[in-house]
Amino acid sequence: MKIFNFKNKAKSVLSITKQTLIAYKDERAYFHGAAIAYYALFSLFPLLYLFLSIFSRFIDHYKVEAIIKYILTDKIGLSNISEIMNLISKYNFSNHNLWYEILSFIILIFISSSFLMSLRRSINEYFGMNIKLKRKSDTFSQKSLSRIFTIVFIGAVGALIIFLYLFQSICFSWLSNYLSSTDIIQTYTSYILDWSLSLLTNYLIFLFVFKFMHDAFVSWKVASMGALVTSFLLFVGQLLIKFYLTNYFFLGSAGIAGSLFVFLTWVHFSCQIIFIGAKFCSIYADRVNIPIQFKS
């Protein structure tokens, strides 16, 4: 009986995997990825400024810069970030008057939310909402609410990244106090901790994305399963992407221009994995009889 159930589950997994890949292939994945990468590039510096401006008020400015360096080098695979960090460090967040700061903040938020709005439109299409959305004309208030929602999302992701980074730093400090720096146990424990926190971060972000970052009703069960699959695929995929960009991408060492090309490539290929996860959500929802429905 157990063997029979295992065979049925294996067939079900293979079937949904095949259906997901076929459906993904039929969509305009590379066009969506290119659009999001384009918006992400223009949003990069405003996002970094916002990240520093907001969170430097709560924790040390240099600690926030260290987190940015960690993301750009360890997670994305940029080898030369000195020029990027120099541009960011030239901006002084404490010496401007209040009205100038508020105006700058509003402008930066408007620019930095563009790529998340693009991601929202792409997920709508992968959920099958694009045809229904064409029949619906968004009002100014609805568009404003969507932008406010993306701003909240940016803040939540930033807070999550900082919290997990600080937690990871505390754990690494504890390991170094109790274990020798050359101890193989510390080395492997550090790797496991780093990977586990990366998977947890991915899962929480995609749970939020698949539940809220679109114009459809998605159950928590479907969003959770989609986030679980996507977080694992993205974790493995980004390790491979980082390895390629670090070792074989010929523009990787070409100064700030090369770093921006690396960033574009990283976003584009990461988006392909996210789109596979979104299409999996759509198919899985139909399989478990909890279909994704349009918000009327």
Image: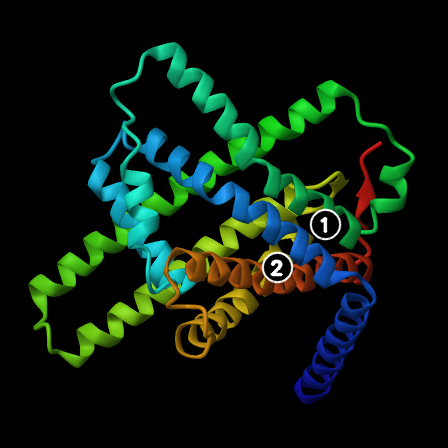
Q: Position of residue 218 (x, y in %)?
A: 72, 45
Residue at the (55%, 33%) spot, across then down: 111
Instruction: State the quadrant of the N terminus.
Output: bottom right
Image quarter of residue 253:
bottom left
Q: Is residue 220 above or below residue 135?
A: below
Identify the disc placed on residue 271.
2
Q: How many marks?
A: 2
Q: Residues within 10 Å of mark 1 (few under 14, many from 20)?
A: many
**In what element is the residue under mark 1?**
helix
For residue 183, side relative to residue 108 (left or right): left
Q: Position of residue 150 (x, y in %)?
A: 58, 34
Image quarter of residue 278:
bottom right
Q: Which residue is denoted by mark 1 in the rendering?
A: 122
Type of the residue with mark 1: Ser
For residue 148, side relative to residue 216 (left or right): left
Q: Position of residue 257 (x, y in %)?
A: 44, 57
**In what element is the residue under mark 2?**
helix
Type of the residue with mark 2: Cys
Q: Position of residue 170 (x, y in %)?
A: 20, 52
Between 41 and 3, the residue placed more toward the observer is 41
Q: Is residue 250 above or below residue 260?
A: below
For residue 203, side relative to residue 87 (left or right): right
Residue at the (62%, 65%) spot, across then down: 273
Identify the disc placed on residue 183.
none
Residue at the (66%, 57%) spot, across then down: 34
Q: Is residue 142 above or below residue 200?
A: above
| Label located before the other in sequence (2 or 1) | 1
The answer for how far apart the CA atoms under marks 2 and 1 are is: 10 Å
Residue at the (40%, 78%) spot, across then down: 247
